[in-house]
Image (tube, rainbow, N blue to C red):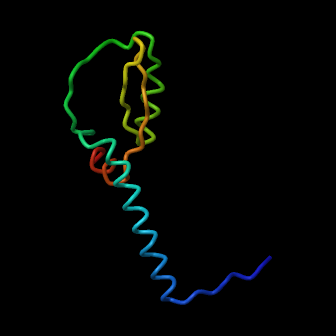
């Protein structure tokens, strides 16, 4: 087993700041996809013919926004990760 490298408190604080910056950047990137969700505008309801609702429920339980897109007459579902902050606000 190798010895761990000892770092100074200065280096540790610098690394903590960098981690915080990277986490903020990741949250901003995720929020770019979910600006209006949750709390978005409901535009339509439809039956779930041909859609396995378990897929949607699983994605939501894992903290993802489920969005759809149409391509060549096919409705495509996507699970997009929601930032931790937005997910906590939505489930509070």
- Residue projecting furthest to the right: 1
How many marks are shown on the rendered structure?
Answer: 0
The residue depicted at 47 percent of the width and 18 percent of the height is: 52
Residue 79 drawn above or below residue 82 = above
Between 71 and 89, the one nearer to me in the picture: 71
Residue 27 is situated, as x and y percent measured from the top left of the image, at 37, 55
The residue depicted at 43 percent of the width and 34 percent of the height is: 79
Taking the image as shown, residue 76 lies to the left or right of residue 86, namely right
The residue depicted at 37 percent of the width and 26 percent of the height is: 68
Residue 37 is situated, as x and y percent measured from the top left of the image, at 27, 39
The residue depicted at 21 percent of the width and 38 percent of the height is: 39
Residue 61 is situated, as x and y percent measured from the top left of the image, at 43, 38
Looking at the rendered image, the quarter that the N terminus falls into is: bottom right
Residue 74 is situated, as x and y percent measured from the top left of the image, at 42, 14
Q: Quadrant of residue 90?
A: top left
């Amino acid at each position: 087993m190798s010895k761990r490298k000892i770092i100074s408190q200065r280096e540790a604080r610098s690394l903590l700041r960098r981690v915080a910056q990277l986490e903020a950047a990741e949250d901003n990137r995720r929020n770019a996809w979910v600006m209006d969700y949750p709390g978005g505008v409901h535009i339509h309801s439809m039956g779930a013919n041909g859609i396995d609702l378990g897929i949607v429920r699983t994605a939501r339980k894992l903290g993802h926004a489920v969005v759809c897109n149409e391509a060549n007459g096919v409705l495509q579902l996507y699970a997009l990760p929601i930032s931790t902050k937005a997910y906590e606000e939505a489930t509070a």
